[in-house]
Each structure stands twice: as C-alpha cells, then as structure tokens.
C-alpha cells in the first residue's frame, strides 16, 4: 500500500486539473494564437503561469485504484500488475486466464 499522503496529493492534482481545465485551455489557446498581438500573447502566458502548478494535467500520476502503487500500471484497467494478477488468478476478471505453454 502506498503512502496515504501520496495518494491524496495525486487526488488533489486531479481535482485542480478538472477545476482549471477550461481556463487553462482558453489561456493556452490565446498564448499560441499567432493572429493576436505579441503583448496579448505575453499577457496570456503570464496569466497561465499564475495558475497553480498542480492544475496541469501532466503533473498527475497514474496510480493503482486498489493499492495506490505508482509504477507498473495498466491504463486499461487502472490497476497495477500485481493487483491485476491477483484478481485474474482469483477469477475476478472475466476471460483472463494464466497463460502456459
């Protein structure tokens, strides 16, 4: 099990990203728009940099939903390889069987 503080910090980043998503997208569009004057684009960059850093989507970490493990996760299932194997061996995931050859 991962540290609770790490899991909660990641949840906070997810909440902040959802909260500021529209504002961040609008400011990024203004900052990258070549038809706007350079002063306005620079002002958009300044406003963008004043937003909380944790509101950026790239700061989120993919963590296992069951254990909070930060590495070795399958995006499709949103769980770690260890939790996936445990669930597959107990028959909790339909159609998944242990391979042997």
Image (tube, helix red, strand yellow):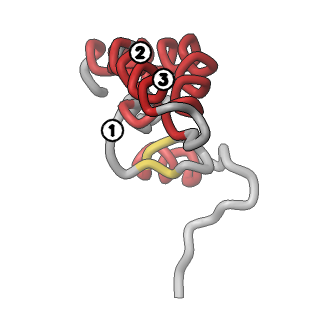
Question: Where does residue 53 sit, x and y in percent of width and height?
Answer: 33, 20
Marks 3/1: CA–CA distance: 40 Å
Identify the disc placed on residue 70.
1
Determine whether the residue tagged by mark 2 lies in a helix, strand or loop: helix
Q: Is residue 94 left or right of residue 17?
A: right
Visible in this render: residue 17? Answer: yes
Residue occupied by mark 3: 40
Sequence-wise, the earlier of marks 1 and 2 is 2
Sequence-wise, the earlier of marks 3 and 2 is 3
- Tell me whether circle 3 and circle 2 mark residues in contact (CB < 8 Å): no
Q: Image quadrant of residue 80?
A: top left
Along the viewing direction, whichever of 62 and 95 lies nearer the viewer:
62
Q: In this view, does 98 lie to the left or right of 49?
A: right
Q: Image quadrant of residue 19?
A: top right
Q: How crowded is mark 2: few (under 14 residues within 10 Å), some or many (20 or more)?
A: some
Give the label, 1 or 2, closer to the camera.
Answer: 2
Question: Where does residue 12 sit, x and y in percent of width and height?
Answer: 42, 12
Give the label, 3 or 1, closer to the camera.
Answer: 3
Marks 3/2: CA–CA distance: 11 Å
Identify the disc placed on residue 47.
2
């Amino acid at each position: 099990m991962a540290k609770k503080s790490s899991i909660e910090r990641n949840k906070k980043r997810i909440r902040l990203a959802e909260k500021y998503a529209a504002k961040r997208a609008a400011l990024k569009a203004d900052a990258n728009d070549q038809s706007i004057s350079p002063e306005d684009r620079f002002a958009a960059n300044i406003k963008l940099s004043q937003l909380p850093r944790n509101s950026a989507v790239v700061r989120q970490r993919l963590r296992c939903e069951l254990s909070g493990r930060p590495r070795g996760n399958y995006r499709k299932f949103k769980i770690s390889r260890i939790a996936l194997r445990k669930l597959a061996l107990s028959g909790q995931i339909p159609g998944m069987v242990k391979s042997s050859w």
